[in-house]
Image (cartoon, coloured by chain):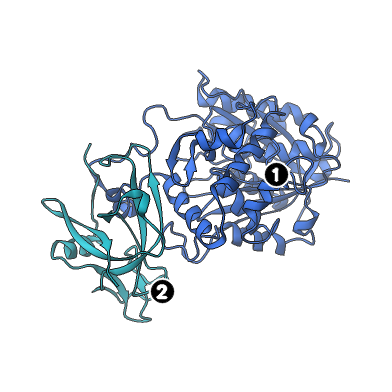
């Protein structure tokens, strides 16, 4: 079975649309400056509704991870799932996978950067690779 | 407001696979709880359940199945909730407030045999899952494994610590005649068991079974006239934190248990040091570890050593999951934790009895949602 693909809705379409243009967009609150993920029509910090997508650097650090040995649709076990803390804000996290790192070598604290990866004609995923510092 | 007590508790048949309907298991558990309380269905005017992901029957099913004369209160609790403790707290608060006089709270679990964990995702995925499933992140075990990994990083918790949780709960299950897994295990057995998603092995996971449990809740005044000694419901809470989301949660080394603990201890003069027995949710070994820390039963970061030292064993500092928990006693979604606490406080637990147990804590939920209740032996 193939990897599951996103089914965007009115609130999340910008994220996937941005990726198709090789841009990582995260919702940003114009009222308090908070970055918001997952996309919502209001800011969880201040309740403000003036929220709009804004490009981020795509740089971050591996916050935590798990190496999955169970069979999961579209993945050959073992494979690693990582949570990436984006550098724009503490705790602003994306679920992703690392390219070019064997599952056993994934480590907390690894600096990473986004790699726009085509997985279907209309879907680009924000995967990550190790960032040289 | 009235004082409330748990007057009866009962299980259905419990096994890895029971060839009976979820409704049949539910009614058996409810009848056993009523009989334990010395009451009949004619005495019941309230029902609550947590039907989970629509995998169990409703309050109305039970009202019909038991032939209740009428309902003055009922509640079916869906969504992200701390499992089997949810209806117990809801029913106890309904009795306390006077909405009903005697309520049944139940949870029944029937395993889904049509697909293994993580296999429900294919094609296009919406909601928050659109940000997880395309990366192979589809199982609750993966979400909590990532929390556990962060805890290991920050506090030095080890796989061996997690192994001692599995060993402790299995030892307790070996003394529980209704537990499905009763053979003791060693640390070698633990390390040899199949890895699911690191750091979790199969022995870190709860053990899926078919079965149900129910408790009967009434006023403490009424419970005193019944055959079994009543167990007082002192307080119960549900809680979550500022960002109730599996990835955006502020600190992955604390679960919502931190907030449930704060809310619970605020409601009473009883302190963590007064607790004689703890039945904490163990969907995974680390969930139990984090509950112990967040409830204040040990220092933050000392959860692993707490189990490795044997402090959680019957006879230890604070006996924990004395029935074997969900990991060895079967995944009954914490209704079994409630029933075990009641039976411990009544002194009915035989070889695994915590001598002189007067005060117990039950918790349920993990990650972003938590529920906790404080029970005590009525004097």
Q: Residue at x 69, y 34 (%)?
A: B172
Q: Colour of chain A?
A: cyan
Q: Look at discs 2 and 1 and give the one toward the viewer.
A: 1
Residue at the spot of label 1: B320
Secondary structure state at the residue bearing disc 2:
loop
Chain coloured blue: B
Q: Position of residue B233 (x, y in %)?
A: 74, 48
| Total numbered labels | 2
In the picture, measured across the screen, residue B369 lies left or right of residue A42, that is right
The chain to which mark 2 is attached is A
Q: Position of residue A102 (x, y in %)?
A: 31, 50
The chain to which mark 1 is attached is B
Nearer to me, B266 or B16: B16
Residue at the spot of label 2: A47
Nearer to me, B273 or B26: B273
Secondary structure state at the residue bearing disc 1:
loop
> In the picture shown, does residue A52 fall above or below B33?
below
Q: CA distance from mark 2 to mark 1?
A: 41 Å
Residue B280 can be seen in this image? yes
Residue B331 can be seen in this image? no
In the picture, measured across the screen, residue B304 lies left or right of residue A76, that is right
Contact flag, marks 2 and 1 (Cβ < 8 Å):
no
């Amino acid at each position: 079975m193939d990897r599951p693909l996103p089914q965007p809705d009115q609130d999340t379409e910008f994220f996937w649309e941005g990726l198709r243009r090789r841009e990582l967009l995260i919702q940003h609150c114009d009222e308090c400056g908070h970055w918001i993920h997952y996309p919502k029509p209001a800011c969880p910090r201040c309740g403000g509704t003036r929220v709009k997508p804004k490009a981020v650097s795509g740089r971050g650090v591996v916050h935590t991870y798990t190496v999955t040995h169970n069979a999961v649709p579209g993945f050959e076990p073992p494979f690693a799932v990582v949570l990436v803390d984006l550098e724009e804000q503490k705790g602003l996290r994306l679920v992703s996978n690392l390219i070019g790192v064997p599952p056993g070598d994934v480590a907390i604290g690894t600096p990473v950067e986004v790699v726009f990866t085509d997985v279907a004609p209309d879907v680009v995923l924000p995967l990550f690779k190790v960032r040289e510092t | 407001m009235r004082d409330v007590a748990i007057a009866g508790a009962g299980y259905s048949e419990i096994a890895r696979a029971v060839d009976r309907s979820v409704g049949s298991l539910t009614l058996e558990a409810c009848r056993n709880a009523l009989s334990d309380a010395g009451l009949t269905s004619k005495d019941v005017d309230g029902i609550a359940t947590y039907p989970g992901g629509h995998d169990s029957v409703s309050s109305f099913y039970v009202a019909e199945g038991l032939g209740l004369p009428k309902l003055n209160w009922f509640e079916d609790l869906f969504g992200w909730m701390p499992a089997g403790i949810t209806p117990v707290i809801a029913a106890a608060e309904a009795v306390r407030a006077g909405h009903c006089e005697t309520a049944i709270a139940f949870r029944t679990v029937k395993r889904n045999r049509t697909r293994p964990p993580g296999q429900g995702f294919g094609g296009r995925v919406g909601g928050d899952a659109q940000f997880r499933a395309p990366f192979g992140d589809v199982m609750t075990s993966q979400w909590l494994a990532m929390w556990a990994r962060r805890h290991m990083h920050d506090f030095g918790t080890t796989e061996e610590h997690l192994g001692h949780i599995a060993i402790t709960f299995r030892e307790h299950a070996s003394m529980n005649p209704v537990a499905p897994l009763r053979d003791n295990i060693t640390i070698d057995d633990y390390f040899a068991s199949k890895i699911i998603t690191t750091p979790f092995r199969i022995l870190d996971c709860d053990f899926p079974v078919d079965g149900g449990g129910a408790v009967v809740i009434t006023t403490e005044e009424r419970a005193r006239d019944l055959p079994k000694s009543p167990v007082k419901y002192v307080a119960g809470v549900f809680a979550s934190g500022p960002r109730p989301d599996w990835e955006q949660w502020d600190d992955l080394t604390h679960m919502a248990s931190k907030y449930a603990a704060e809310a619970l201890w605020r409601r009473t003069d009883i302190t963590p040091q007064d607790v004689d027995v703890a039945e904490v949710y163990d969907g995974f070994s680390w969930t139990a570890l984090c509950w112990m820390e967040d409830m204040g039963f040990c220092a933050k970061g000392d959860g692993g050593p707490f189990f490795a030292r044997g402090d959680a064993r019957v006879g230890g500092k604070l006996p924990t999951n004395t029935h074997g928990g969900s990991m060895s006693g079967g995944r009954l979604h914490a209704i079994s934790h409630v029933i075990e606490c009641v039976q411990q406080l009544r002194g009915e637990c035989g070889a695994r009895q915590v001598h002189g147990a007067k005060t117990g804590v039950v918790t349920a939920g993990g990650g972003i949602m938590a529920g906790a209740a404080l029970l005590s032996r009525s004097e």
